[in-house]
Structures are given as C-alpha cells and as structure tokens.
Image: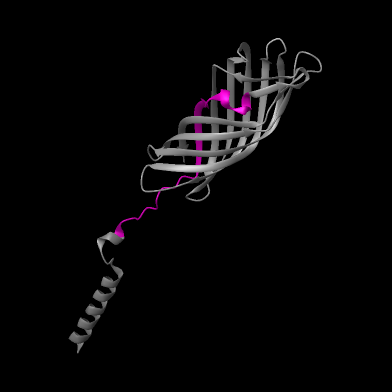
Amino acid sequence: MRKMVVASAALLFAGVVAGAAPANAADLVFKAQPYQPNWYFEARIGSPIAPANSSAFDFTIPQAGFASTYEPRTGFYGNLAIGRYFTPNWRYEFEFALGYAADGFHGGVPDTGSLTSIGLMANLLYDFKNHTAWTPFIGAGLGTQIVSMNRLGGAMAADDTDIALAASIIAGLDYRWNRDWTVTARYTGLYTGGMSFDTNIAGFTVEREAGWLNIVTVGMRYQW
C-alpha cells in the first residue's frame, strides 16, 4: 500500500511539473511588436515647378492699369516639420516653410528685387503602408503665408509685407532607409489668398493674385 501511495504521489508531481513546463521551445521566444515610430522630424528642400505659369507670381498695379508675371531665375523652397503618428497610417505635422526668389523678369524687363515667403502650415497625412520599404502618402494642409516683396517691380517698386490664408494638397513617396531614417519626396499644391503691397509711389499698390504654386521637395525624416 505504501508503495502505491509513493508511486501515485510521484506520478502526480510529474504531471504538475509537466503541466507547468512550456509546451515547446518556441513559447520561450519573446515576440516583439512591429516597430511603429511615434514622433518625427523632417527637413526638405526643393523649388517651385514652372513658376512663370503659376498665378501665385502674377501681380497687377490697378492704379496704373498694369499687369505682369514675375519670373525668377534663382531661388529655393525649404521646409522643416515636426510630426506625430497617432495611428499606424495617420499622422499630423506642423510645418515651417521658407521660399526665396530673385534675379527675375516681369514683362521681359529685368528685375533686381526679390520675393520671400514664410509658410506656417498644419498638415494631416495618410500613409499607404505595405510590405515593402516604399510608402506612398497623401494629405492636406491649412495655415498662413507671410509674403514680402523686396524692392520688386522696377521704378515703381513694392517693398512691403502681407499675410494671407493658405491651403495645400499633398502627395509623396517615402523610402524607409532603416529603423530611424526615411528618405522622402513630396509634391505640394499650395493655394495662397490674394495680397496687397504698398509701393514707393503714394497711392499705388501691387496686388498679388490668389492662386496655386506647384512645389516639389526632397529630404530626410528622423523618426523615434
């Protein structure tokens, strides 16, 4: 009888130990969650596309019955943005943009003035995630543009600053370089409201028409 009790106890203990042990070695492997960044910082640089065909560079002097298009020969458009992913596909960002154009022509006449713009935009973007390192995205933005004409216009020159509401549509493509860095390219269709600038002749103003500016930029994004 004592031997049966001992044998039964041994079997019970072995069963408890076996039940507590993992079913297989795979259960001991830590299953890491897919990496999903939270915040990111992005820097890009580029230029407008065919600015001479964009109404964002058209202007008039109503008091003189004059209309023209400013066609710069040099310039750039740069962006800095900080953003956050709030779902695997959706992210928002706050963007600072600086544009500069100079050494241009209007109506075939050389113009030594320049035009600068500062953009402050809030953007919402959607990433089309997939199983490759390439991720297309689309988005839209809303904000403001602060534009300065610096001695622009020749004899009747505008040297003034105005502010207008702005909106944008966005499309782009990312390439995930590694865990922390992404190469990004972006098209921005930027709509800016109309503006008015005082000139060096009293009573005369330069009116900059509302319109679209097509911009392409490329850069890098650091995510953490």
User: What residue span does the magenta drawing correspond to?
Assistant: 28-57
Identified at 27% across, 67% down, the residue is 23
Count how many numbered circles sit on residues in the image: 0
Which is nearer the eye, 221 or 46?
Answer: 46
Identified at 30% across, 61% down, the residue is 27
Extreme residue in the left direction: 3
In the image, is residue 204 part of the stretch drawn in magenta? no
Q: Quadrant of residue 107?
A: top right
Q: From the viewer's perspective, is residue 153 above or below residue 96?
A: above
Extreme residue in the front direction: 65
In the image, is residue 54 part of the stretch drawn in magenta? yes
Which is nearer the eye, 163 or 69?
Answer: 69
Q: Quadrant of residue 151?
A: top right
Q: From the viewer's perspective, is residue 30 above or below residue 57?
A: below
Quadrant of the frame with the N terminus: bottom left
Q: Would you say 139 lies left or right of 67 here?
A: left
Which is nearer the eye, 9 or 195?
Answer: 195
Which is nearer the eye, 133 or 31?
Answer: 133
Residue 148 x, y percent position in the rendering: 67, 22
Residue 141 x, y percent position in the rendering: 59, 40
Residue 184 x, y percent position in the rendering: 45, 35
